Amino acid sequence: MQKVPLTQEGVELKRRELEALPEAEFRKQLKEIQFNFREWGLENFKLNEDHIAYFKEMPQEIVDQQGLGIAIGFDYKLEIRLTTPETYNAPLASKRRTRVIAEGSGTWTPGEPVHINKYYIGVSYTIPL
């Protein structure tokens, strides 16, 4: 699989690449995203040194939540919005604070598959000036 830019367009390119895979390989990639998101992200996106350092330092709980959310988004063909502030490339980017937002809705009946209406996960970074 090719590396794509860490942009909204890159996420959409990755979606199309995943959806073009045979079903068994698509399911394998979803498992990688869900359970090994840090490594999968490093292997599938073109990242600068700051992205890589931050991604490697990101708390595992956030990585796990992102992996689950993104795997669900690809699997159910839900909108995945990549939100990165313009200040991300600022020299102080390594000192930013992180906030994760996860929102979703759906239904579940015992014995039935989960029905997901929407799932959104957002990560914002604050750079102190």
Image (cartoon, rainbow, N blue to C red):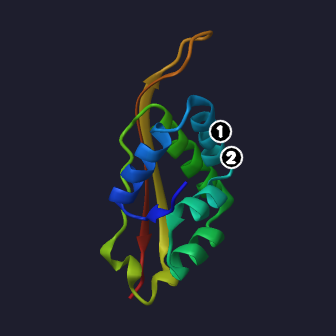
Residue type at the position of mark 1: Lys
Residue shown at 50% from the left, 45% from the top = 70
Which residue carries the number 1 mark?
Answer: 28
The disc placed on residue 79 is: none
Which one is in front in this view, the residue at disc 1 or the one at disc 2?
1
- Check the picture and name the quadrant holding the N terminus: bottom right
Q: Nearer the viewer, residue 124 or 20?
A: 20
Query: 102 or 11, which lies in front?
Result: 11
Q: Residue at x 58, y 68 (%)?
A: 55
**In the rendered view of the protein, which quadrant contains the C terminus?**
bottom left
Q: Earlier in the sequence, mark 1 or mark 2?
A: 1
Describe the element under mark 2 as helix, strand or loop: helix
Q: CA distance from mark 1 to mark 2?
A: 11 Å
Rendered residue at 63%/50% (across/down): 64
* x then y, percent, for residue 22: 55, 33
Residue 9 placement, left or right of 101? left
Residue 35 is labelled as 2
Provide residue 106's location: percent of width, then percent of height: 44, 25
Q: Position of residue 7 (x, y in %)?
A: 37, 63
- Give the camera-side residue of 96 and 17: 17
Q: Secondary structure at mark 1?
A: helix
Q: Is residue 96 above or below residue 103?
A: below
Q: Is residue 22 left or right of residue 39?
A: left
Q: Determine the residue positioned at 43% across, 45% down.
A: 15
x then y, percent, for residue 87 = 34, 79
**Is residue 78 or residue 117 the one in the foreground?**
78
Q: How many dots with numbers? A: 2
Residue type beneath disc 2: Phe
